[in-house]
Image (cartoon, helix red, strand yellow):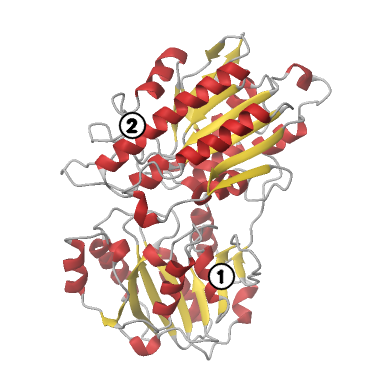
Amino acid sequence: MVNVKGDCMNAKQKGMLVILDGMGLSNGANAGKIGATTKEDMPFVHQLMQQYGHASLVASGELVGLDKGQAGNSEIGHITIGAGTTLPSTLAKIRQAYHNDEWAQSTVWENINIDKPFHIVGMLSDAGVHAHWQTIIQAAKLAVTKGITTINIHLLLDGVDSQAGSAIRILEDFHRDFSQLPDTVKIVSIMGRKWSSDRAANWQVTQHAVSSLMGNEEQNHYKEDLLSAHLEIDSEQNFPCHWLMPQSAISSGDTVLFTSHRADRVSQLVKLFSKHCHVLAMVELKLESVNIKDVFFKTKPLTQGLVSHLTHNGYQTTRLSEQCKLPHITYFINGMQEDKNSHCIEIPTIADEKIKGQPEMSLQQLLAELETAVFSITEQSVIIVNIPNLDQVGHSGSLVATKKAAAYVDQAVAAIVQWCEKLQWQLMITADHGNADVMIDDNGLPVGSHSENNVPLIAIDNSGQQVKWAKNSGTLANVAASFSTLLNLPPAEFMHPSLLTLD
């Protein structure tokens, strides 16, 4: 660790780390596809890259702890930025625990009444961002070995992290493995993720998901041709709840396992279900006033990372984002732990269904709060801000809307640069993964899922020293050390090397 009273004396007093969520570079693995982060879409950001130079960072695949060829996501992106090193993803840990019997040996299984219905609620996704269909199969197999006699599967169709329109193909993959399970395991309902995945406190949306899965809403009978017809006009995320076995709806007192491995999107659903059922979770969730005791994979927070390095060297931190992304810069970037010493500014997020029509989202309010913070902070501080538009609007699959979002983000960056120059804040700009950079595929079809493209790293020194790039390529694991260098702090030993030098 760096000595506070020694090395920190020459540190820059104020710095800002800006994460442009979902801004991939169009010259990466998906080059040639149409996106919304080009020089024409974001002229100011591209001007910065030309003026100050930039590094191209890998944000997907094995170099950030994911499977080979797997697109990056916000969880692993922010974890890697904050850790300063590469860590295995939560999904990778779950898979390993399944194959080495660690999951099977969990004491959580001992708390289940095996004679009551056991429900598995899981997202039918192959992207692995919030969940993966294979986890559903693995959970069902383990439930069978534990002697549970009635196992009901409730599938939540993706269409956001997995490409919209891919539900039929993923269902076919799922059925190949599902067909090997005994008759005690049944698929009983199918619905889109829209109602189950809200994270902006739209509780009426979440309540609809609960009511549907408990059989209290209109019970549509499922047929594959109904889903096929739906996919011709809309994404599967909006597919209403349909039943294969309506008599197997979730009842009060039943046990329900949610197979999401992320701490954000499933939290509202779990909170409401915990009022009726015995809830099991794969990972610890971010829930207020609810203590879910039966968690298969307890969080093991990092004891070191960028935030701890800054804190050790006397920096206060302020975190600022819209509600939908605040956990990413208050929890994931902290190495899966809360930082009670930071000042958090939460901006309300508009409902998911409004984002396509309002690509600016709450950006003006975010900027107003950020401007106030920048001009009021006088002590040695760092601001970490996530700007969510490129990711959130990119998920809509609308190129037109995402180009508008890109223009808003570009203007926001221009304002931030101006403030930092005026008040001599050190500024670093990067992204957690790609999304808005690929909006149309080779077949001319819209894309709303994450990309495998690299992301930019821009460093602007406003202290009068000259930033030089030691390397112009790296991974998200290089951000922590590079930001430390920009603040004139020697990077910690655990961090991947800095891509910067300061003269």
Residue 124: name its quadrant: bottom left
Is residue 406 placed above or below 287 in the rendered structure? Answer: above
Is residue 32 placed above or below 485 in the rendered structure? Answer: below
Give coordinates of residue 265: x percent, y percent. 48, 59
Q: Earlier in the sequence, mark 1 or mark 2?
A: 2
In front of the other: 109 or 232: 232
- Residue under circle 2? 37
Give coordinates of residue 228: x percent, y percent. 18, 67
Q: What residue lies at 52% left-to-right and 20% top-to-bottom?
A: 418
Residue 104: name its quadrant: bottom right
Q: How many marks?
A: 2
Residue 15: name its quadrant: top right
Residue 344: tell me if it is visible: yes
Q: Amino acid at mark 2?
A: Thr
Q: Amino acid at mark 1?
A: Lys
Q: What residue lies at 42% left-to-right and 72% top-to-bottom?
A: 209
In front of the other: 495 or 415: 415
Question: Which disc number belongs to residue 271?
Answer: 1
Q: What residue lies at 32% left-to-right and 82% top-to-bottom?
A: 218
- State left or right for residue 316 relative to residue 15: right
Q: Quadrant of the N terminus?
A: top right
Q: Secondary structure at mark 2?
A: loop
Residue 75: tell me if it is visible: no
Q: What residue lies at 48% left-to-right and 46% top-to-bottom?
A: 74
Spatial distance from mark 1 to mark 2, Cα to Cα?
A: 37 Å
Are there few (<14), some (14-19), or many (20+) residues within 10 Å of tag 1? Answer: many
Give coordinates of residue 30: x percent, y percent. 28, 36
In front of the other: 487 or 297: 487
Q: Quadrant of the C terminus?
A: top right
Q: Are marks 1 and 2 in contact (CB under 8 Å)?
A: no
